[in-house]
Amino acid sequence: LPICFHKKNKFQKIHTPIMLLVTVFLLSLPHKAKAQSPISLQAAIDTALKNNLQVKHEHFKAQYQQMLINSSATIPQAILFGEVGQINSSYTDTKFGLTQTFSFPKVYTKQKELQTSEWKSSLIDISVKEWLLIKQVTEVFYNMQYVEQKKTLLQYSDSLYTDVNKKVKLRLAKGETNVLEKISSENQLDQISLQLLQLREDSSVLQLQFQLLLNSTYPFISDQKEKIA
């Protein structure tokens, strides 16, 4: 019986914008090939959180907002001024003075509350960015596993149908079958070859997506020892 793989992929499809991004990234990479190294999901997540530029930006932003909390109650420096000349009479006078501006205590309190609120908001932004990054890394990680496992199954099917096709040709030469069986066998091999070609392309794109998320120049791939959840 012919084997067909028409089951709908439960993972996300790769859209055109992602393909364009991956293409640009591929062109920017050095042409020297590097060996791919398997990485666990947790290690991939840790690497992405450490290297991702957006997450780094949110952390720096939070640190900046935290420093502003302590500066919200800073009193401006006193201003010392002096004047020389005919100020109040025809005689030459000198005048010195010191000015200092203050705000009501409630103003400083409100400023500190505002800066504290903005700092807490930046912490929430960090959590959101990290959660989205973890979600993306996890999805691509398991997509890579799914593609590799399906590729293995198709390669096994390809070897089986290659043997079947050889036997069909021998039977046809001996007159034990007709040309329709030969055509059917070859069509099935062609279908498997096309699916394998598509899976290889999907695998390359997913690997580059994975590298982008980890912000690493080293080509990591998902560790096939971890089972798909």
Image (cartoon, helix red, strand yellow):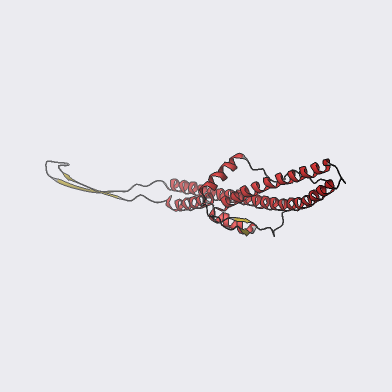
Q: Is 206 displayed left or right of 109 in the figure?
A: right
Residue 4 visible in the current orientation: no
Q: Nearer the viewer, residue 161 or 127?
A: 161
In percent of width and height, residue 29 lies at 52, 50
Q: Who's the residue at 67% across and 50% down the image?
A: 143
Q: Is 115 displayed left or right of 145 in the figure?
A: left
In percent of width and height, residue 32 lies at 53, 55
Choose top left, top right, bottom left or bottom right for residue 224: bottom right
Residue 221 visible in the current orientation: yes
Specify the farthest residue to the front.
174
Q: Report the number of discs.
A: 0
Q: Is 184 displayed left or right of 210 in the figure?
A: right
Specify the farthest residue to the right.
176
Q: Is 7 displayed left or right of 82 in the figure?
A: right
Q: Quadrant of the C terminus?
A: bottom right
Q: Nearer the viewer, residue 16 or 86?
A: 16
Q: Who's the residue at 83% across and 46% down the image?
A: 172
In percent of width and height, residue 101 lies at 34, 47
Q: Nearer the viewer, residue 77 or 1?
A: 1
